[in-house]
Image (cartoon, rainbow, N blue to C red):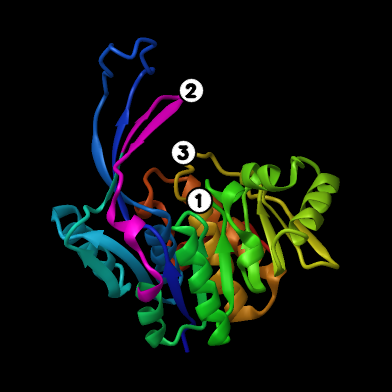
Amino acid sequence: MKKRILTVGEARIDLCMPISELPRSPKAPVIAKSCSFVPSGSGAIAATAVARLGGDSVLCTRIGRDRNGTDLRKIYEYEKIDTRFVAADAALPTSFSVIYASESSARQIDLAPDATSALSPDDVEGAFICRPDAMLISTELPHATVVAAVELARKRDVPVYLDGGASVGSFPFDELPPIELFAPDEDETKLLTDISPDTPEKCLKAAIALSRIVRARFYAIKLGNRGCYIYDGKYYHCLPAYDVKAKDCTAAGDAFVAALTLEHLNSGDIARAGKVANAVGALTVNRKGALISVPHRKDVADFIAERAIRL
């Protein structure tokens, strides 16, 4: 039977415009080479990854009652994501970002307030009627909603897999009950611990420091093109990345955590889950785009077989 994962997170549309360079003067126009509308958002990407990798995916988020929201819902339904708990907000628009990106820099302009900012504990509580095997959530959401969601999961004995986010530095981790796994990236780890996890020794020190901040069974530090480091309070796994040509890293972290969550639920083996998640991350960065870059289960199986990866 498929494992059901309730993903609570952001759904967003990005207007992406590649440019040669950002102008130095604030009054100078930004000249784009092209433009494209890209479905994005950490929650939507993770929910898509769960569905494409063979899980039973349920998404809890808020979109606007607008054209962007209508288009996103159709995309999620096409991906076989359960959208019963994707609420349409009549007052706020769908999350939207304008992204200017060159080879050396990027600038992102976000629309605020947006529908995701109104995602409430009541929204999440209603979604638990799907009876999930796990909840995947990010610190990027309103902090009060995340704390309430984790507490709701605890009362229902639902394991929580918590992704990091830009706001980890201000997140009230002391208000959280124990969770199953916490997955910050390198920058978030350094922000929380003041330790840069750039060597195995520093990864261990950082993981130990994280264990004093967040009560979790596992800590998975996302190391980008160096793979991941997983620690359980006693043992660690330093799992290298697989060599691929990176084209776009936008969705890699979200797809990685979704794959880690699903594989850990399926196998119960955190090291195996880390290897599968690294494979998913490698395939994701090898494709351009956000949500559309997430691989399917067969892609991952073929990648593992071709590289003779021992799980």
> What is the distance, in whole Å, between disc 2 and disc 1 at their CAs?
19 Å
Label 3: which secondary element? loop
Label 2: which secondary element? loop
Residue stretch in magenta:
98-122
Give x and y (percent) for residue 150: 54, 73
Residue 147 in view of the camera: yes
Quarter-of-image position of residue 100 = top left
Q: Compared with residue 171, is residue 144 higher up or lower down, i.e. above or below?
A: below
> What is the distance, in whole Å, between disc 1 and disc 3 at their CAs?
11 Å
Left or right side of 65 for 63:
right
Give x and y (percent) for residue 153: 53, 80
Give x and y (percent) for residue 134: 52, 78
Q: Nearer the viewer, mark 1 or mark 3?
A: 1
> What is the distance, in whole Å, between disc 2 and disc 3 at their CAs?
14 Å
Quarter-of-image position of residue 86 = bottom left
Q: Nearer the viewer, mark 2 or mark 3?
A: 2
State the residue at coordinates (21%, 66%). Answer: 88
Residue designated by label 2: 104
- Amino acid type at circle 2 is Ser
Upstream in the sequence, badge 2 or badge 3? 2
State the residue at coordinates (33%, 23%). Answer: 19
Q: Is residue 14 magenta?
A: no
Number of numbered discs visible in the structure rendering: 3
Residue designated by label 3: 247
- Amino acid type at circle 1 is Ala
Left or right side of 117 for 163:
right
Give the crowd class for mark 2: few <14, some 14-19, many >=20 residues within 10 Å: few
Residue designated by label 1: 252
Instruction: Please identify the quadrant where the C terminus is shown.
Output: bottom right
State the residue at coordinates (21%, 52%). Answer: 93
